[in-house]
Image (tube, rainbow, N blue to C red):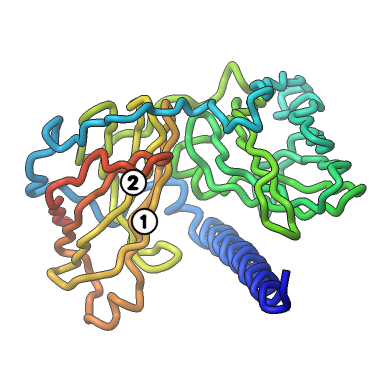
Amino acid sequence: MGEKGKEILIAAGFVALSSLVFLAVVLSGIAVWNYNRENQEPEQAASGTPKYEYTVVDSGTVGDSDIAQSTGNVENADEVDSRDAASTDVIARSGKTGGKISIEPQILLQQSGVTITAQEYVTDSFWGDGIRILTENQSGHNITVGCTALIVNDYMITDLFAVNVADGKKDQSVIYFLSSELKAAGIERIGKIEIYFHIYDSDSWDDLYNSGCITIQTSDYDNMDSTPDDMGQELYNANGIRIVGKEVDEDSFWGMAVLLYIENNSGRNIVVSCDDLSVNDYMMTPLFVSTVYNGKKAIDDITIFSSELEENGITYLERVEFTLQIRDNDTYEMISDTAPIQISTQ
């Protein structure tokens, strides 16, 4: 490789590393904000009563006619690439310790010299609940381990986990579950945790391994919260995918947010995004991409930046309009592009 190629590779490495650091800072900031909000507003947090409610004025026609016909094979959520053909799903059984949530120490993954072990269930007053993970690296590579997906009680949840482990070394870290998302989904008793691990070379950024679904059952498995939190106005229901508008939150981390419930029984992993968003007839830039695996659910929100609201003198959401795009997460094939959805707040 020439000097120019080395410079490009080094620059790419710095960009990728900077992205990881930025993501960690943002997630830490959100965790701090959630912690402060829950402690400063205990009564509002306990009641769960939204300041705004909304109803759909005109969602247009959404149905089978909006669904693009698939011509290719749809991969199952549990399938992995050819390098992972020998991998199998792992179920770690729970241990019971006097009512406190716990798990049995369990090897979750052994692949190409990398061993990942779930050691214990932890609860931190600031970060929330999580699983302590021991990663041992004898792969011959410096590696980075993260989660492609984290699912708690069948809800997609944002994880706070990414570790670098040098060859021949070990790392002990915690996969934390974002507490605000657990709360939004109505999850208090965690019984089932599903993890998809992603391992790549820290130096070359080459993928080394993508695991299948690894399932951990906790001591609260038989009592876990499993009732769908799907109350609200149905915005879309077709081809095994259901989207419900729940509330408008004026005090979200970035500004204001439209909270959605998404349920996916389509037979494929999907990604839902938003376009053509306007507030009180002013165009806005939405922040919303939600990945929902087949058979799973998500509580996610369309974020409206406070800076854009301020620039347009908007202090109260009277009318919100947007479209939703639903795509296959693996092929990026368009499944549905909805008609404009109009919402009026009360």
Image quarter hosting the N terminus: bottom right
Numbered disc 1: secondary structure: loop
Q: Which mark is residue 231?
A: none
The answer to whether residue 273 is above or below residue 320 is above
Q: Residue at x 27, y 30 (%)?
A: 71
In the displayed image of the protein, which residue is found farthest to the top?
A: 222
Which residue is disc 1 drawn over?
A: 288
From the top left corner, tell me how far across and down residue 11 is, in percent. 65, 74
Left/right placement of residue 319 relative to residue 47 reads: left
Q: Are marks 1 and 2 in contact (CB under 8 Å)?
A: yes
In the rendered image, the quadrant that contains the C terminus is bottom left
Give me the residue at 78% from left, 48% from top.
173
| 226 relative to 306 in the view: left or right | right
* Crowd band around label 1 with a 10 angstrom C-alpha radius: few (<14), some (14–19), many (20+): some
Q: Residue furthest front?
A: 2
Residue 104 location (% of width, % of height):
79, 24
Q: Earlier in the sequence, mark 1 or mark 2?
A: 2
Residue 311 image offset from top left, x and y in percent: 27, 83
* Placement of 320 over or under 148, stated as above or below: below
Does residue 207 lie above or below 81 as drawn? below
In the image, what residue occupies the spot 71% across and 22% down?
A: 92
* Residue, disc 2: 272
Write the residue at 88% across / 47% down: 170
Residue 46 in the image: x percent, y percent? 46, 46
Q: Is residue 74 above or below residue 210?
A: above
Q: Distance from label 1 to label 2 (Cα)?
A: 8 Å
The answer to which of 209 and 180 lies nearer the viewer is 209
